[in-house]
Amino acid sequence: MMTRKLYYEDAYNMQFQSKVIKIDQDERGHYVVLEKTAFYPTGGGQPHDKGTLNGMEVIDVEEVEGEVRHYTDRLLTGAGSVEGIIDQGRRLDHMQQHCGQHIISAVFHDKFGIPTTSFHLGTESVTIDLDTEFLDADLLEKAEEEINRIIRDNYPVETKWVAVEKASEYPLRKPLAVEGDVRLVIIPDIDYSGCGGTHPDFTGEVMAAKFLGWTRNKKQVRLEFVCGYRVLRKLGQKHQVLTEMKRIVPKPEQKLVEEVDELIKINKQKDKKIAELEEQLLEYEARDIISESQGDKVIQRVFKDYPIKTLQSLGKVIIEEAPDAYLIFISEQNDQLQFVLAHGTDINRNMNEVAKQILPLIEGKGGGKPNFVQGGGKKLIDGEAFAERVKHVL
């Protein structure tokens, strides 16, 4: 017995009662099959409806092997009939987005000769893939203006079931890939498409459409947009961001980009200057360490909370200045030890072999070039004791 699909009879029907035909489960979980349903199953680029059956949450709806399966958060028991309630906000949102997509695709196809090849209705935005490699700003502006004119003019949105042979009498945007009867969604003089989705009765209910941008996808363009209440939400989000930006950067909106761009340039200049000064400080510190070592063949230091990158930079400067010395740098960081082991160009020794012998002491990992290795592990012994063990291995 086929389920009667109430969402095709009235897309605004958000509440219904029905007999239960079947209760079962598959790899997706527990599901219920009903005599009739207003729950739209996933299909044609449109996500499924959500809602409740006798108060139980409907988390997924899929059409499988001719059955409309309502997947619930727990097993339905002891019910010969159920009351279904559709998540109205989600349904109306999907109706706005899907109808908006039809209008957008029709305008790109008819006005600019660019067909749509795929459609995806996401939770935050909608995308279509267009069979072109580029969209310029002028074309997008003209397309968006025409799309919103069609929405404002409040065209009727009609649906009808016809035989595939009869459907060919309509100016369809793309050929049909089904047999038997097909459901057409028609916006007179605007769009004629085979479609199984839910739509409003008039284009005015779409409210508005706004392009968010496009990216290249293989040899096509992926256009992102929103319609209906999503436009208002996006406007609210952007207004909140702008309000916060104006609090941080007290400038008029039209000057925010210019001001932020200038701040970024200034910060980059400061970062560059700080990096130069840090490099100079490392050179001074390296010279002090070399001077204090007084010609020692092993230069050994234990630091507190030095980042590994600082140890590396400091070590590189020192082995350039002391070609005949070994280097043991340890950094103690809470419950960790990090190290750099190196030697100058006059010494022929693979420091990876040294690291391999001492890493078990801290259950650590490390490696690098034969003359310069780094690593780290747990602070199972203190830094001074670890440095002495390394020195002993040398």
Image (cartoon, rainbow, N blue to C red):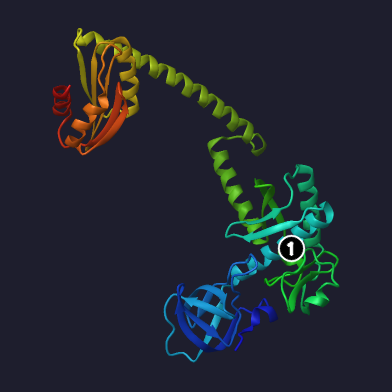
Residue furthest bottom as drawn: 80
Count of numbered circles on the image: 1
Task: Report crowding for label 1: few under 14, some 14 to 19, many 20 or more residues within 10 A (C-alpha).
Answer: many
Picture layout, residue 373 above or below residue 222: above
Residue 202: name its quadrant. Answer: bottom right
Indicate left or right for 358 with 318 as reference. left
Q: Is residue 285 visible?
A: no
**Residue 255 image point, x, y percent:** 65, 34
Q: Is residue 153 left or right of residue 94?
A: right
The quadrant in which the C terminus is found is top left
**Amino acid type, mark 1:** His
Residue at horizontal 30 percent and vertical 23 percent from the top = 370
Q: Which residue is mark 1?
A: 102
Q: Give the percent coordinates (x, y) of residue 229.
A: 65, 61
Disc 1, SS: helix
The residue that appears at 30% across and 31% down in the rendered structure is: 367
Q: Quadrant of residue 87?
A: bottom right
- Quadrant of the rendered image containing residue 77: bottom left
Answer yes or no: is residue 212 visible.
yes
In this picture, residue 318 sits left or right of residue 359: right
- Between residue 54 and residue 302, name the one nearer to us: 302
What's the residue at 72%, 53% (across, down)? 130
Q: Position of residue 90 (x, y in %)?
A: 59, 68
Please provide percent x and percent y for residue 218: 65, 47
Q: Is residue 207 above or below residue 195?
A: above
Residue placed at 21% from the left, 10% from the top?
292
